[in-house]
Structures are given as C-alpha cells and as structure tokens.
Image: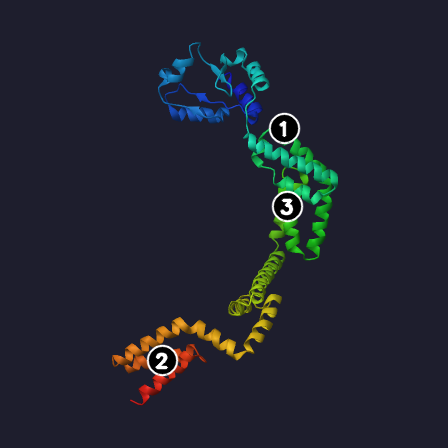
Amino acid sequence: MEMVPHMVDMNEKYAGKGLQIIGISLDEDRNKMVQVTKQKGMTWPEYFDGSGWDNKFWKQYGSNGIPFTVLVGPGGKVLYAGHPAAGLDEAIEKAFKETPPVLVDPSVMAEANEMLSQVEQKTASGDTKAAFKLLSKVPMSAKIDAAVASRFSRAAKKLEDSANSMLADVQAQIQQGKYIEAVARLKELSAGLSGIAAGSKATAMLNSLMSDPKARAAIATDERNAKADDALEAAVRLQAQKKDELAYAQFTQIVKFFAGTDGASKAQAQVSLYEQDSAFIQKVREKAASSKAVAALHMGDNYRRAGDLVTARRKYQSVVDDFPGTSYAEQAKSALDAIANQ
C-alpha cells in the first residue's frame, strides 16, 4: 500500500506512452479488493482468482516478497524484476528509449504522416481550404503517437489564424441566412481543428446554429429544394434519352412530393407539355392501369359467370372510376351495359 501512490503516478505518466500495468491480486475477498483499488485510484486491470498466496503468477515470479514488479518489453523480454522502489523507474525510462512500444499500426502511421505532409504543403502554398480538409482526414488513432500528435498540433496552430478568419466569414453567412453553407464549413473546421481553440469555437457555433429553430427550418427548406433539383436533373436526363414515359412519371412525382419548390414549378411545366399530347397520355394511362385494371376486369367476369351480378357491377364500376379514359374503362362500361340488358 505504501507503493500504491507512486504506482498511480507512474501509470498517469506513462500510460499514454504505451505502459500497461496489470495488477496481480493475492486477495481472497474480491469485493474488498475492488473497494481498495477504487479508493486508491488503481485504475489498471487486476488479475484475481481468489487463491491468495497460491496464486499461480505469485508462485512463478514472486519469490522476493511483495510488492514485486516485472517489466516486460514489447518483444516479450523481461526487462526488470524486483521491488518497484529498487530501480523500476529507471528501467522504464531505459525501456522507452531502447525498445519503445509501437502504439499505432505502421500503415496508419505512414498514412497520417503523408497526410500531414500534404497539409504542410497546402498551408505553405496558401491553399487553406484544402489544408483543412486534409487535416480532418488524418486518422485519429495515429494521434496516440507523440510525434504524430506534435506534428498535427503544429500544423493545426499554423492554420488557426486562417481558421479564425474563416469563422468570421461563417458568421457573416449565418447573418445572411446561408445556413447550409455555414453548416458545411463549420463541420469542416470542427473536424479539421479538433483539439485547438478554433476547432472548439467552430463546434460551439455549429451546435448553436443547429439548435436555432429558424436555422433548422431554413436548412430543411434548402435541403428540400436541393432534393427537388436533383430529382429534376434526373428527369431531364431521362427526357434527353427519349425515355419520355419514365421522364413524365418522374416529373409527376416531383410535382407531388416537392410542391412549392422551384424544381416542382419546372417539373409542372414539363408535365403540362406532355399532357398536350393526348396520344402519349393515353399510352401512359394504359400502361399504368394495365395490371390492376386487368385483374379487376377478370374478377368482374368471374362474378358475372357465377351469377353474382351485384358484385360484378361493383368491380366493373371500380375500373370505370379508377381508370378513366383507358380501354379498360371502355371494356368495363361494355360489361355493365351487357348486364343491364340481360
């Protein structure tokens, strides 16, 4: 227990650099052991099997009494074994110099360093926007490495002055009601400058903007307009490819689902042009009605043959009502006339 405060300090100093402490408990009461570790700030894992002094690890390593520590290097080699006050600190310092642990996958490290090199190049050439985008793509896991973290911090700080200028521009966009552009830029700045003041400021501005009902409503409207424009573009492509039936259906859907948008107004103009061609509209109606109308006509015929004229009339009338102007409606009318003349 006398060594615990020192071990806690050691853990705080070295854990972020790759030191992992694992406690081997000789206790027989697990609840008491857990209580003590919490009280003392022993946040590392503790091995406990309830065997007390018969613990297998104690028998393997602990012949010199307690406390007893074993320092194992990244390659599995025992670098120190003994009382923690008899040279453990020096052994750890030496180990970090001679056999430092690999905290990040080499491929991730290579990707991060390459990305940071590009960030530095873009910053030097004045392409701040590109530098921000690249900085936001640096793998977060690579920042565990002290060298990468330091390089990232230096790159971010060089961009901070530019970031503050950009934040002022974003504030102007917000005042002008350009919410979508402002949100996109704030997300970019928040991700790219994570961990520095400008990044925190961008995050705070983003949260504030997204909690503003007026801004949310405007963003929703802009997004709806954007979706309508995308759908209109797709319909125009179909039209250019001479796929007029598909284009007409797409224009009709835009009018239905995006009413009030500029895209819907343009789509309605195209719908009106198509509907001037009665032969085309007849063809579209026939095709749209085919499966349901044919099924209803068959059902009407079956009821008629079975002698259930009331239900047969109802089925035929549904075809007339649901598919006006089609050949199926004319067939249904003929069937109704035939029933009436029986």
Residue sticking out furthest to the left: 306
Reading the chain from its start, which is encountered first: label 2 or label 1? 1
User: Looking at the image, do the residues carrying marks 2 and 1 touch, with CB atoms under 8 Å apart?
Assistant: no
- In-front residue for pair 92/261: 261
Q: Which mark is residue 147?
A: 1
Rate crowding at label 3 as few (under 14), some (14 to 19) or many (20 or more) other CA atoms within 10 Å. Answer: many
Q: What is the three-letter code of the residue carrying label 3? A: Glu
Read off the residue under disc 2. Answer: 316
Task: Tell whether 223 sits left or right of 128.
Answer: left
> What separation in Å lies between label 3 and label 2 (alpha carbons)?
61 Å
- In-front residue for pair 225/131: 131
Rendered location of residue 11, percent (x, y): 54, 23
Q: What is the three-letter code of the residue carrying label 1? A: Ala
Asked which secondary structure carries label 1, the reply is helix
Task: Tell whether 83 sits left or right of 228.
Answer: left
- Residue shown at 72% from the left, 37% from the top: 158
Reading the chain from its start, which is encountered first: label 3 or label 2? 3
Q: Is residue 200 visible?
A: no
Asked which secondary structure carries label 2, the reply is helix
Reading the chain from its start, which is encountered first: label 3 or label 1? 1
Above or below, comparing residue 64 to residue 183 in the picture:
above
Above or below, comparing residue 315 to residue 216 in the picture:
below
Rate crowding at label 1 as few (under 14), some (14 to 19) or many (20 or more) other CA atoms within 10 Å. Answer: few
Q: What is the three-letter code of the residue carrying label 2? A: Tyr
- Residue shown at 34% from the left, 78% from the top: 315
Read off the residue under disc 3. Answer: 188
